[in-house]
Image: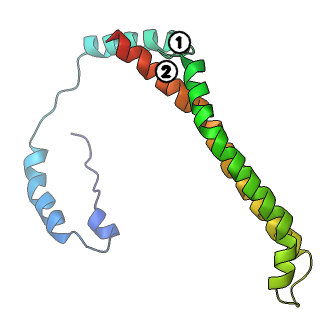
């Protein structure tokens, strides 16, 4: 009979699960009486043959690896909805960046360094560019998903 290892999470966890540990100790003799047969040689051989066959095959291509029909139309729809707000966002960001040094000179205390008047707008610009990249970079993903769903809804 194989040697039984003792895994006692209650000893590691500061005996938080003492009641569970007691139940497991009570069940341990009952579980030790069970005899489990090893799998037969035929089953092991068949499993190894199937595993070798699966590992020898190249990885199958995704089911929708090609660009679905209607992708360009969906992307155009999404861009048409996203470009007008983009113009407003860019105009606001340009306004803020052009006026920021003047505002910061007026509002920042005199003891802060002058370079901070340029560092804060630069950080703002980098953050705005990051968000714009995330939003507009995700549009092709959404367009692909919408086109793929339309294609599959039409087929089903």
Question: From what the image shows, is residue 16 above or below residue 123?
Answer: below
C-beta proximity under 8 Å, tags 1 and 2: yes
Question: From what the image shows, is residue 4 above or below residue 56?
Answer: below
Give the residue number, with chain letter if any, for mark 1. Answer: 69
Q: Please give the name of the residue rendered at 47% of the width and 26% of the height, measured from the top-left corner.
A: 146
Q: Residue 49: in sight, yes or no?
A: yes
Q: Does residue 40 appear to the left or right of 141 in the view shown?
A: left
Counting from the top left corner in percent of width and height, residue 1 is at 21, 39
Task: Looking at the picture, tell me which residue is in the foreground, 19 or 155.
Answer: 155
Neighbours of disc 1 within 10 Å: few (<14), some (14-19), many (20+): few
Question: From what the image shows, is residue 69 above or below residue 22?
Answer: above
Q: Please give the name of the residue rendered at 7% of the width and 49% of the height, measured from the top-left corner.
A: 30
List the single residue furthest toward the right. Answer: 114
Counting from the top left corner in percent of width and height, residue 46 is at 32, 10
Question: The C terminus is located in which quarter?
Answer: top left
Chain-order first, disc 1 or disc 2: 1
Q: Residue 122: in sight, yes or no?
A: no
Give the residue number, with chain letter if any, for mark 2. Answer: 147
Q: Residue 82 carries which label?
A: none
| Mark 2 secondary-structure assignment | helix
Neighbours of disc 2 within 10 Å: few (<14), some (14-19), many (20+): many
Q: Please give the name of the residue rendered at 61% of the width and 32% of the height, measured from the top-left corner.
A: 80
Counting from the top left corner in percent of width and height, residue 118 is at 88, 69
Tell me the distance, in whole angstroms, between the alpha carbons under discs 1 and 2: 7 Å
Counting from the top left corner in percent of width and height, residue 144 is at 54, 24
The colour mode here is: rainbow
Q: Does residue 22 appear to the left or right of 45 in the view shown?
A: left
């Amino acid at each position: 009979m194989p040697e039984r290892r003792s895994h006692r999470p209650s000893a590691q966890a500061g005996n938080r699960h003492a009641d569970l540990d007691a139940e497991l100790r009570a069940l341990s003799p009952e579980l030790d009486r069970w005899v489990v047969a090893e799998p037969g040689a035929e089953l092991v051989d068949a499993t190894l043959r199937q595993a070798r066959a699966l590992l020898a095959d190249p990885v199958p291509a995704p089911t929708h690896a090609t660009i679905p029909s209607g992708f360009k139309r969906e992307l155009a729809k999404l861009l048409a909805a996203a470009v007008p707000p983009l113009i407003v966002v860019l105009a606001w960001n340009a306004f803020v960046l052009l006026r920021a040094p003047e505002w910061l000179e007026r509002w920042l205390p005199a003891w802060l360094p002058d370079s901070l008047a340029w560092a804060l707008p630069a950080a703002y610009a980098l953050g705005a560019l990051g968000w714009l990249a995330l939003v507009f970079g995700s549009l092709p993903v959404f367009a692909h998903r919408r086109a793929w769903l339309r294609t599959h809804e039409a087929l089903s």
